[in-house]
Amino acid sequence: MARKEPAFTIGVEEEYLLVDKETRSLVVDPPATLMEEAEEKCGSQVTAELLRSQIEIGTKVCNNIQEAHEDLARLRRNIIEVADRHGLAPIAASTHPFSSWTEQKHTRKERYDMLTHEMQGAARRLLICGMHVHVGIDDDELRIDLMNQMSYFLPHLLALSCSSPFWNGRDTGLKSYRLTIFDALPRTGLPERFASFAEYQRHVSILMEAGLIEDSTRIWWDLRPSARFPTLESRIMDVCTRLEDTVALASLLVCILRMLYRLRTRNQRWRIYTPMLIRENRWRAMRYSFDEGLIDLAKGIVVPFEDLLDELLSLVAEDANALGCVNEVSRVRNILSRGTSAHRQLKDYELERASGASVEDSLRSVVDTLIADTAEGL
């Protein structure tokens, strides 16, 4: 009997930073009524994050990318509206241009209290935001098989999503500084490889029985089987400032997974490369975004990112058509042509400095751009 195709449903989670519209700094102690008002508008689709200056939204389970786009736009609008009542604004960026983690307060919640106690300084520095994309794949074995193959493409997705070039008021020289902070935690980075879902469960059980983790939600790989849903959850991407980029990258992700599934139905599969080589591309994406290309692991040479993207879009063309997201996937080329959020932040900063603005004023101008771009297209 032919295997039933996965649903490839989509769920997107975005984390935002809350800034004071007057000072452009992070709001250290937002009013309690802000979260109450956000919950009135968004229900369980909005939650507090580790730090009080953060807020997270999550779409419903969406049958296609158009539904996800609509829900994301609604959620962003609601958070912007609620924050504005308090003189605040959300920015969809993975780091704040100048506010320091040392000034932040963490949310009083048992899970976060335990995390901070266990991880100490590594957790207190987590002034970072990400974008998580869930893709519905209800077969346990298929989820593990696709996770093993999908690892190859994670650096490509990161390169297109970078939004964290600044840290504590300085240009870090990296387009995605976020992962240097997150990688200090255990059980992060590229996912492990497993021959079966049972093998994955055995490894998780060892950590649970040893009392090291409560459940697999404490495994924070770049890609993981979700502990709560029958999904494969991508966690490598920075949060995209522009909604259009979020939608484009979520579309590309689900198309890649469908392409890998389609190959499997034809008794084919993507070649499995060593983590050492994929980590090299991961680092290049963190450092350069797409500016200096990635390694074509089949050829063993660094290739311009545009060439890799052309090849990837060709590979998933059939899948984009089947999933009804041809237009959305094609917009990843817009990211390549105008740059990621990190490129835009750095350009704005350099232009302000060149015009004679101080470092502090230039960084505040970057925040203004982030506020505007977060609300663009809503």
Image (tube, rainbow, N blue to C red):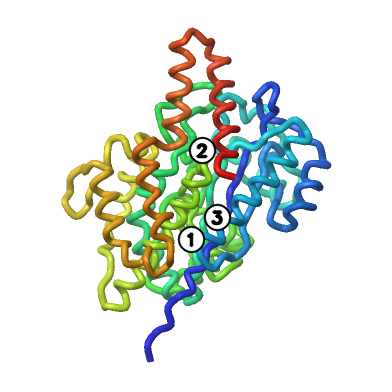
How much space separates mark 3 and mark 2, taking CA atoms?
29 Å
- Name the amino acid type tagged 2: Ile
The answer to which of 43 and 274 lies nearer the viewer is 43
Residue 261 horizontal side relative to residue 241, left or right = left
Q: Nearer the viewer, mark 1 or mark 3?
A: 3
Point out the image quarter for the N terminus.
bottom left
Q: Given the current orientation, which residue lies at the most extreme top position?
A: 356
Q: Which disc, if any, is residue 224?
A: 1
User: Could you say where residue 119 lies in the image, as x and y percent from the top left?
Assistant: 61, 44
Looking at the rendering, which quadrant does residue 335 occupy?
A: top left
Q: Quadrant of the C terminus?
A: top right
The residue beneath circle 2 is 181
Q: Is residue 54 left or right of residue 327?
A: right
Q: Nearer the viewer, residue 285 or 192?
A: 285
Q: Nearer the viewer, residue 181 or 373?
A: 373
Neighbour tally class for label 1: few under 14, some 14-19, many 20 plus, Cα within 10 Å: many
Which residue is label 3 attached to? 69
Residue 286: image location, x then y, percent: 39, 38
Task: For residue 17, say whether it is visible.
Answer: yes
| Mark closest to the chain's N terminus, 1 or 3 | 3
State the SS at label 3. helix
Sequence order check: which comes first, mark 3 or mark 2? Answer: 3
| Mark nearer the viewer, 3 or 2 | 3
At label 3, which amino acid type do we have? His
Work out whether 195 lies above or below 109: below
Q: Secondary structure at mark 2?
A: helix
Residue 113: x %, y % from top left: 72, 46
From this viewpoint, is residue 212 visible? Answer: no
Under circle 1, the secondary element is: strand
Q: Which three-letter amino acid code belongs to the residue tagged 1?
A: Arg
